[in-house]
Image (cartoon, rainbow, N blue to C red):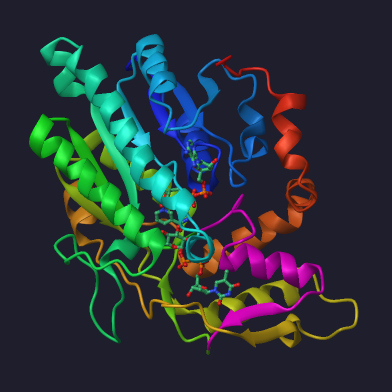
Amino acid sequence: MNSNPLFITGGAGFIGSALIRQLIAESDWHIVNIDKLTYAGNLESLAMLSNNPRYVFSQTDICDRTALDRLFAQHKPAGVIHLAAESHVDRSIHGPADFIETNIVGTYTLLEAARAYSSSLPKAQADEFRFHHVSTDEVYGSLGANGLFKETTAYSPNSPYSASKAASDHLVRAWQHTFGLQVLVTNCSNNYGPYQFPEKLIPVVILNALQDKPLPIYGKGDNVRDWLYVDDHARALRMVFEHGTAGETYNIGGHNEKTNLEVVDGLCTLLDELRPRSDGKSYLAQKIFVADRPGHDRRYAIDATKIGRNLGWKPQENFVSGLRKTVAWYLDNDDWIQHVISGEYRNWMKQNYSNRESS
Ligand code: NAD
Ligand code: DAU
């Protein structure tokens, strides 16, 4: 067991919280969760850990170098898994500034704090310190009908979000090449599962369906995404952090290519079975086609051969099992949903959290 903790940035978000829940349940790691708590940060997703002695939360902006230096000096982490980001493509189109600030300037600031900390360590310890940057398949751009994104695919980001993530990937790589920081980069496809904020396709559709609202499908609904259950992503992140080769990139994907229409239809069918509408009609009746996303990438699909071959990772869920679990979770967790809808989740920490660091 490593007595030094792991820093997880963005741990109050969808994937970060899944990773922390999994690491606390299945490993010996002590975790320091560093999160600014933007609209996307929800500590209620970590409610079960609020008194756990292996878990600490610090409300900190990754752009705040002074606060980061203090955290590194205080906790002496064994490594960082960096998930904090602005993550929603539509928001990046309406307002790119926060994406530039957090995803690029924030990653740069965190890299500099990590570099300063690791260079203060004895050489053997510095060589062990790892900075794992969690990124997206969107940096590779858009595929046509055929082909898969490989680790060697040239970057071609199309949205302000993906351009900001591409920039951060390049910074991370440069910090290894120039300064010798031990880095790992993972590029993953679309995640889905419990605790996802209702701005992304799957939770939007589930929540709108249950509230008798339209289910908005951009364009013709024929864009393709490669869906991965969030716990499978979390498992891959742990494997890469613990066993990956520093300096390498690993693509992570679910081999679950679906058109958006297939996803929405699948969700409606599950909801028809698990929570039928009171009027006896199908939720399919709530589908509407709306204006397309500007610059909408046509298709993403990941070649995950490398992480499978080198680290033995493969997803445990397929889309049928994962989607059923996801719908069931949303149906069983009305409190979490109602607090998100009402905005109450933003006050949740003040009322309920005990293991919060004063900053
Ligand atoms: P999310 O939007 O659910 O969570 C992001 C978290 O980062 C939030 O808790 C937020 O409060 C925090 N945050 C934002 N700005 C911050 C700042 N300046 N300082 C500290 N914390 C800040 O995102 P997610 O879907 O969980 O994605 C996590 C990471 O994984 C992101 O880097 C994203 O690019 C990447 N990713 C996401 C997906 C996906 O399908 N969701 C797929 C591949 C990669
Ligand atoms: O590929 C990985 C990326 O997946 C991550 O890096 C991003 O953080 C994550 O948000 C996700 O990006 P997408 O843009 O693919 O996800 P989103 O859920 O927003 O949209 C999925 C598809 O569904 C996309 O083709 C747009 C479409 N869509 C989305 C919404 C919100 C709709 O048709 N209607 C909707 O209401």
For the point 62% across and 46% down, the residue is 39
Query: Which residue sits at x=60%, y=78%?
Result: 264
Q: Is residue 332 magenta?
A: no
> Where residue 187 sits in the image (x, y, percent)?
30, 55
What residue span does the magenta drawing correspond to?
192-219
Figure label count = 0
Q: Is residue 112 above or below residue 175?
A: above
Residue 156, quarter of picture? bottom left
Whether residue 44 appears in this view of the structure is yes
Residue drawn 68% across the image and 77% down it: 215
Q: Which residue of the protein is positioned furthest toward the right in this rendering?
A: 279
Left or right of 94 on screen, residue 346? right
Q: Which residue is at the front of the view, 232 or 169?
A: 169
The image shows residue 109, relative to residue 206, as above or below, that is above
Is residue 214 on the magenta stretch?
yes
Which x, y percent locates residue 26?
45, 32
**336 sits to left or right of 61:** right
In this rendering, is residue 116 above or below 92? Answer: above
Residue 238 in sight: no
The front one of 108 and 267 is: 108
| Quarter occupied by the C terminus | top right
Q: Does 262 sit left or right of 143 as displayed?
A: right
Which residue is outermost to the bottom? 220
Name the residue nearer the viewer: 183 or 36: 36
Q: Position of residue 218 (x, y in %)?
A: 55, 81
The percent coordinates of residue 18 (x first, y second) are 51, 42
Residue at horizontal 90 percent and vertical 82 percent from the top: 279
